[in-house]
Amino acid sequence: MLPDRKTFPPDFTFGVATSAYQIEGSSHGEAGPSHWDTFAATPGNIADNGNGSLACDHYHLWPQDLDLIRDGGFSAYRFSTSWARVMPDGVTVNPQALDFYDRLVDGVLERGPAPHLTCYHWELPAALSDLGGWQNRDIAGHFADYCTAIHRRIGDRVASTATLNEPWCIAWLSHFLGHHAPGLRDIRAAARAMHHVLLAHGTAIQALRGDGARNLGIVLNFETAHPANDSPGAIQAAKLQDAIYNQWFIRAVMGQGYPQAALDGLEPHLPQGWQADMEGIAQPIDWLGVNYYTRRLYAAGAGLWPQGDAVDGPLPKTQMGWEIRPEGLTEFLTRLARDHVGSLPILVTENGMSEAAGPDITADPRRIAFIGDHLRAAREAMDEGVNLRGFFYWSLLDNFEWGWGYGPRFGLVHVDYQTMARTPKASWHAFRAMLRE
Ligand code: FCB
């Protein structure tokens, strides 16, 4: 069951989220190649050998997708613009792309919801990837230019702007664990990306503000890291994981410096003079976006630093094997307010679950329970004083789930990838009943 709408303040935002590469179809509209196209073209990188070239064909079907947001009763839509679409070679603007996002933003507004922009949800233009991508310090200036180009076209109509989505994924998952583009497993590459991604955020915030942009933030992901047992090695592994994942980015953004436990391993590989960048990284922001999905257990591993192995946990799991633990959302929201952001407005910018489609593609009772439990967990954080202003479900549509391909279904709306038919699931109807009552 979803909670009663009245248990949240009248101006609380209920929205849905998507991202460009996962839904648009990168082969349309003269988008340039991104490092996700390259990564997906490498055999074995994507579970079903899929890619985002067609995805949900949102590039053409966006009007009906926006109708679904309106009809579901949502007051906000979080979407991203694709850097590779807007700047196919990484630097030169593609007018067709700006026209597309211009129409999209007007389309959202005409239907009522407020558009919330994320500038980077992972489509790095391949041309910039060729120059080292996030490993190359120049990325910060390029990124600021890209954000400014977007702002100049649609910034007058968006309710909020986030620089980056999930820097942990951009840097660590992609350059150390190798699971996302560019698929590297290299400590030096990872350390540089961990720093440059933040430098890019700070540089972009300064450029956007200088250009008159308002309501600026960043979207960070948080994942509970618990020790798998009470051995000192497991406790240490979970602590280190927490430092790399849950502290590195928020501390830097809030001017609190990198966490020592992570620095112990990464500092030898950081770019020289990194300390001088910390002030520019810690730009004031107007809100923080929090993505929360799951927790993971860690045991001492036999390998080199950071010496941790993720271990299968005992809780109920989603289609992707992610443990379901709603109280983790309350814990992170209260911890963020207490240790990092104080009364800064927070938005839950992503939360959701993947669930395979059964014979009745609209039946998703576990998703409804998941959403209800997480909304109640969010409400609890508000009761504890957290300045939480909104909640965006991930995702409006089933879509391209990165390395997992099209298997995991996160949508409130089912997508048939043969016909591109959209069919609202019971969870979409549950939201509609809650929000329209
Ligand atoms: C987040 C991503 C989003 C989606 C969800 C399931 O890490 O931001 O694009 O893949 O996970």
Image: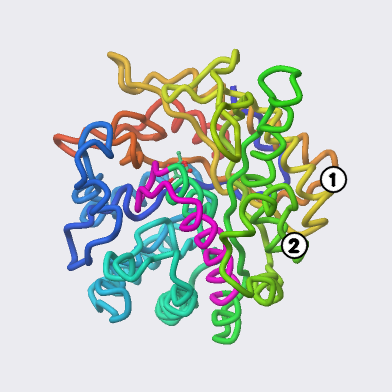
Residue 128 in percent (x, y) is at 33, 70
Looking at this rendering, what residue extends furthest in the left direction?
A: 418
Magenta span includes 189: yes
Residue beneath disc 1: 385
Decide: is 264 above or below 314. below
Q: Nearer the viewer, mark 1 or mark 2?
A: 2
Identify the disc placed on residue 257.
Answer: 2
Q: Is residue 385 left or right of residue 127?
A: right
Residue 367 in percent (x, y) is at 49, 24
At x 30% / y 16%, what residue is drawn?
360
**Viewer-nearest residue: 403 or 7:** 403
At x 44% / y 64%, what residue is drawn?
134
> Mark 2 is on which residue type?
Gly
Label 1: which secondary element: loop
Mark before the other along the chain sequence, 1 or 2:
2
Q: Main secondary structure of the magenta part?
A: helix
Tell me the quarter of the picture where residue 376 sits: top right
Q: Is mark 2 within 8 Å of ligand 1?
A: no
Circle 2 packing at 10 Å, graded few (<14), some (14-19), many (20+), is: some
Q: Which residues are magenta?
A: 178-204
Look at the numbered discs 1 and 2 and tell me whether their residues touch, using CB distance below 8 Å.
Answer: no
Residue 149 in percent (x, y) is at 40, 80
At x 71% / y 72%, what residue is drawn?
284
Decide: is 25 above or below 313. below
Residue 199 in view (yes/no): yes
> Mark 1 is on which residue type?
Gly
Q: Is residue 43 left or right of residue 182?
A: left
Residue 97 in percent (x, y) is at 27, 71
**Viewer-nearest residue: 257 or 26:** 257
Q: CA distance from mark 1 to mark 2?
A: 25 Å
